[in-house]
Amino acid sequence: MKPGEGGCRRWRRPLLGAMAVLGLTVVLVGYFSWQSYVNHVRGLAVSPLDLTMVADGEYEGEYDGGLVKARVRVTVAGHRITELTILRHDTGLGKPSP
């Protein structure tokens, strides 16, 4: 073997193996995190609201589901929801939704 040859070859296989293991780890962690989030969202319960008990006015509320966050304003008039305004809606990427 000539001087300078083989040094790169000697490290290539272990380096590629380590990169493959790291890549697989990232994919698996992402997949299981996503599945956990999906199960969380599917388990959300929304209770019925008796609007006859709600006074006319504007109400604000927010929800932080981890990957998705939302803030809304609801207008109630005559015991009916007359307007719903999304004040903020962030996607899992930390950006506003389209």
Image (cartoon, rainbow, N blue to C red):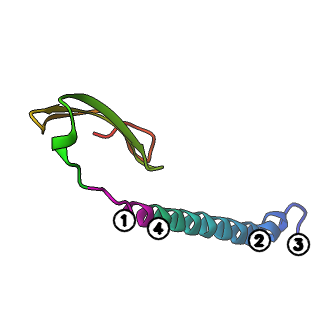
Dot 1: few (<14), some (14–19), or many (≥20) neighbours within 10 Å? Answer: few
Q: Secondary structure at mark 1?
A: helix
Report, in whole angstroms, how far the alpha carbon at label 3 lies from the one at label 4: 51 Å
Q: What residue would you read off at disc 2?
A: 14
Hey, which quadrant is residue 13 in on the image? bottom right
Q: Residue type at mark 4?
A: Gln
The first of marks 1 and 3 along the sequence is 3
Q: Residue type at mark 1?
A: Arg
Q: Secondary structure at mark 4?
A: helix
Hey, which quadrant is residue 86 in on the image? top left
Quick check: can you spot residue 41? Answer: yes
The first of marks 2 and 3 along the sequence is 3
The first of marks 1 and 2 along the sequence is 2
Q: What residue would you read off at disc 4?
A: 35
Q: Is residue 4 left or right of residue 38?
A: right
Residue drawn at (50%, 67%) of the image: 31
Q: Nearer the viewer, mark 4 or mark 1?
A: 1
Q: What residue would you read off at disc 1?
A: 42
